[in-house]
């Protein structure tokens, strides 16, 4: 997925998706340290199956403690 850095405002980078120019994404600027306004960036999102299972297990344990 590609996006353009629209602006950097208060430590937040505002990106506009190339596929849909009505959709914006706000990210902490430290995730894009070399980016400048107008830069085209490539965004890759992957699913973390192991991390998801660990988070679910942790949530179940927390719920059991509350009961």
Image: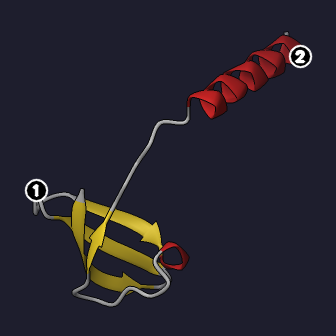
Q: For residue 8, which quarter of the picture?
A: bottom left
Residue nearest the viewer, comparing 18 with 12: 18
Taking 33 as reference, is 35 left or right? left
- Look at the picture and state if 48 lies above or below 43: above
The residue sitting at 50% across, 84% down in the picture is: 33
Which residue is drawn at the image coordinates 73% and 23% (left, top)? 59
Q: Is residue 60 left or right of residue 23?
A: right
Q: Residues within 10 Å of mark 2 (few under 14, many from 20)?
A: few
Quick one: which residue is furthest to the right in this view?
A: 65
Are dots 2 and 1 in contact, CB under 8 Å? Answer: no
Q: Is residue 51 above or below residue 23?
A: above
Q: Position of residue 11 (x, y in %)?
A: 50, 82
Question: Which is more foreground, mark 2 or mark 1?
Answer: 1
Q: Quadrant of the N terminus?
A: bottom left
Please, what secondary structure does the residue beneath circle 1 have?
loop
Left or right: 31 as drawn, with respect to 58? left
The crowding category of the residue bearing disc 1, from other C-alpha atoms within 10 Å (few below 14, some 14 to 19, many at least 20), is few
Q: Position of residue 36 (x, y in %)?
A: 34, 90
Q: Nearer the viewer, residue 11 or 48?
A: 48
Q: Is residue 55 above or below residue 13?
A: above
Mark toward the start of the polypeptide (2 vs 1): 1
Viewport quadrant of the C terminus: top right
Residue 24 at x, y percent in the picture: 25, 62
Label 2 sits on residue: 65
Instruction: Give the spatial CA distance, label 2 vs label 1.
Output: 44 Å
The residue drawn where x is 28% and y is 89% is: 37
Residue of label 1: 20
């Amino acid at each position: 997925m590609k996006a353009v850095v629209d602006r950097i405002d208060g430590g937040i980078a505002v990106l506009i998706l190339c596929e849909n120019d009505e959709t914006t994404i706000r990210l902490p600027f430290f995730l894009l340290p070399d980016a400048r306004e107008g830069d085209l960036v490539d965004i890759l999102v992957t699913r973390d199956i192991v991390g998801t299972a660990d988070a679910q297990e942790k949530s179940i344990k927390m719920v059991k403690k509350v009961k």
